[in-house]
Image: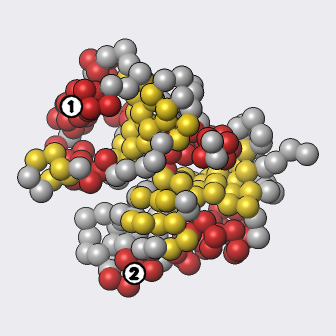
Amino acid sequence: MEIKTLAIDCGGLFIKGSVLDDKGTMHANPVTVETPYPLSPERLISVFEELATKLPKYDRITVGMPGMIRHGVVVHTPHYINVNGAHTRIEPELKEAWTGLDFQTMIADHFKKDSLVLNDAEVHGAGIVTGSGLEVVITLGTGLGFAIFDGGKLAPHFEMSRVPVRRSVDYDEWIGEHVRRTIGDALWSRRVRLMIDNLRPVFFWDRVYIGGGNSRRIRSAELMGDDVVIVPNTAGIQGGVRAWSLASK
């Protein structure tokens, strides 16, 4: 019996989802809604319900969301703990609600479906990695997403977005959507290329994939080298099936 997966990609600006078959083929065009704020866990689940009503039937759920997600538990998530998203005031009640939340179990209990919750870059990577060598996935959107796969196995997650670039400025602040809008695509693209140059001798990857909503905005991407591949943003949904096997290795 074929298993259908409801794959949901949660971003700081938009949340989108589709239903995929065992081969990762979408059975409906992705449905997209704006990320509502303030965003409690309960409100995010209501968004999932809204998406599900517009999509075909499904047997299980995959959710990719920003932040440090460990075994389905939210250790830390950016944006959703803020009153109105990125670069707005942190709401203590939201921070308390999200921190330490077993969101994977919460979703499974609510929908009565097997569920998997990972960092959004990890789900994104599941849709594109080849399984050969050390592969790094970087997503560019509201902030910076990051995942590592070694021989197709998902490595433990760490928040590259929180690494300082200079003084108190981290990668989220240095290369996120807010900065791109401020300095323009040309200067922002130079920062992306510089980031790749800085990270290459740290990871010595075999290949790095750059996706996310802003990957298409990178200018002169060929200057980053043959080990850099720009991938479509739909991978954030298409990885929803393969994520189950990669996460369990």
Q: Is residue 55 visible?
A: no
Q: Which mark is residue 96?
A: 2
Q: Is residue 123 visible?
A: yes
- Quarter of the figure with residue 148: top left
Give the percent coordinates (x, y) of residue 137. Answer: 43, 36
Q: Is 39 on the left-hand or right-hand side of 114?
A: left
Give the percent coordinates (x, y) of residue 196. Answer: 27, 30
| Vertical placement of residue 223 versus 116, above or below | above
| Nearest to N terminus: mark 2 or mark 1 | 2
Depth check: give the residue in front, 18 or 130: 130
Query: Image point 49% across, 32% down: which residue?
Result: 150
Q: Is 92 on the left-hand or right-hand side of 183?
A: right
Q: Which mark is residue 198?
A: 1
**Three-letter amino acid code at the position of disc 1:** Asn
Query: Image point 69% across, 68% down: which residue?
Result: 108
Q: Is 131 on the left-hand or right-hand side of 199?
A: right
Identity of the residue furthest to the left in this view? 167
Query: Image point 49% across, 50% down: which residue?
Result: 120
Judge the density around disc 1: few (<14), some (14-19), many (≥20) Cα neighbours within 10 Å.
few
Circle 1 — which element? Answer: helix
Give the percent coordinates (x, y) of residue 163. Answer: 23, 50
